[in-house]
Amino acid sequence: MNSKSLNSQHVRIRGHEIYLEQYDSGKAPLVVLLHHGLGSLKAWQAQLEFLMAHDISVLAYDRWGYGRSDDRPSLDPPDFKEDVRDLKALLSKENKALVLVGHSDGGNIALMYASRYPYNLLGVIVVAAHIYFEPRMAVGIQELLRSYQESDVFQKGLQRQHEGKAVFERWFQAWAQLGVEWDLRQNLALIQCPVLVVQGSEDEHATVQHAIDCAAALPKGRVEIVEGASHMLPQKSVDVFNQILIQSLLEFQKVDQHV
């Protein structure tokens, strides 16, 4: 990565500090990367490098309670209201057209943001987002808990990435409490911009039908299933995902020019 062009800093919003990294090409759109529920901006390393190489403005940050940002007492599914408010505060002075790219929990945050704050949004890309409860999700959560309990490498890796924060414990407590009544589809009907719903066919936490249902609930939704890919598609199928990303950016811009 061209570190000379990357701005890394802590910013204070809503009473806590957020760590971010940003590359400004001077051109729109600005791509905002929202990491998954156990990750940090480091999960987007390949995409940061890819977008910078294509001279595309990009912002990635450690959400409150993650990575190098301040700690927090708890997470707040089902609507991620605190994370949405943080994102709104981070983007409050941004004049460029925006494209939100969210992975898993980050995808949920992107969708909830788009349903409430449509201004300047060129489009949204969500990868492995969850919009309603299904048995496969519950099974995946329990499997992750077992892996965490049995793997010292997994535990220590999360501790290093998040500077000792209890990220897994908070994440598990938040998601394990959700039941069959949890459903975000009514929120999706409010989203005005184009949304691409991406999911791997071998996602451990959701069925392919889940992604199809998500796209169907969106006024301008489209689904793309990546055969053989897992839940960690952006990290494990980097080249495939990066091509989806760049093609989607071009399509969003074409649509915007014809509006």
Image (cartoon, rainbow, N blue to C red):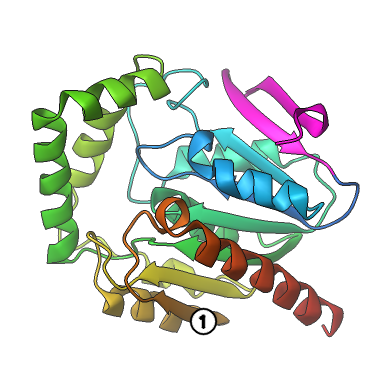
Quadrant where the image shows the C terminus: bottom right
The N terminus, quarter of image: top right
- At horizontal 33% and vertical 46% (from top left) the residue drawn is 77
The answer to whether residue 13 is above or below residue 104 is above
Q: Residue furthest top?
A: 164
Q: What residue is rendered at 20% in x and 35% in y?
A: 173
Give the residue drawn at x 75%, y 47%: 52
Majority secondary structure in the magenta region: strand
Question: Percent from the top left, x then y, of residue 207?
Answer: 24, 72
Given residues 66 and 236, the one toward you in this image is 236
Q: Where is residue 7 drawn, in percent x and y?
A: 76, 28
Q: Is residue 124 above or below residue 224?
A: above
Q: Is residue 16 magenta?
A: yes
What span is colored magenta in the figure?
1-24
Residue 211 lies, in percent from the top left, at: 36, 74
Q: Residue at x 62, y 56 (%)?
A: 100
On the picture, is 146 further left or further right than 251? left
Quarter of the figure with residue 249: bottom right
Residue 14 visible, this orientation: no
Quarter of the view holding residue 236? bottom left
In this rendering, would 47 be left or right of 111?
A: right
**Residue 154 or residue 126, whichever sits in front:** 154
The residue at which mark 1 appears reads as: 222
- Residue 136 inside the magenta-drawn segment: no
Secondary structure at badge 1 equals: strand
